[in-house]
Image (spheres, helix red, strand yellow):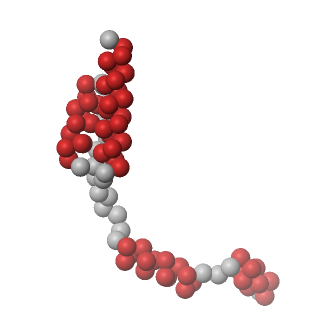
Amino acid sequence: MKASTLFTAVAALVLSGSAFAADAPAASTAVSAAAASSLSVPAVTISQSTSRSRADVSAEAVEFVKNYKTAFAIQLEQYKN
């Protein structure tokens, strides 16, 4: 009995690992969710985040570089005043 439970747990981990590595295809996700529910382990679903686009991040980085001052430059400004 314990060997079959161990085998089921290992199979669930392998399926969930391969689903994560393959960018979570639907069939593998369904199998890993079914295996997780039979083991009383919470299933993890990975969805696309609704974060900022690459263009937004790039624009923010460019703006940061334009306004960036080194620690030495900040200290020089403090000594001038």
Tell me where residue 21 appears, x and y as whole percent.
35, 49
Whether residue 42 is visible here, answered yes or no, is: no
Q: Is residue 57 left or right of residue 80?
A: left
Q: Position of residue 35 (x, y in %)?
A: 26, 30
Q: From the viewer's perspective, is residue 51 above or below residue 64?
A: above
For the point 32% across and 58% down, which residue is it? 49
Decide: is 24 above or below 62: above
Residue located at (43% from left, 80% from top): 59
Quarter occupied by the C terminus: bottom right
Between residue 5 and residue 76, name the one nearer to us: 5
Residue nearer the viewer, 53 or 1: 1
Residue at position x 29%, y 57% in the image: 48
Furthest residue to the top?
1
Is 10 placed above or below 26 here? Answer: above
User: Residue 12's image quarter?
Assistant: top left
Q: In the displayed orientation, state which residue is furthest to the right.
A: 79
Can residue 29 be seen?
yes
Tally the marks. 0
In the picture, the quarter occupied by the N terminus is top left
Please provide percent x and percent y for residue 3. Answer: 36, 16
Q: Quadrant of residue 44?
A: top left
Residue at coordinates 49% horizontally, 77% vertically from top-left?
A: 61
Image quadrant assignment for residue 17: top left
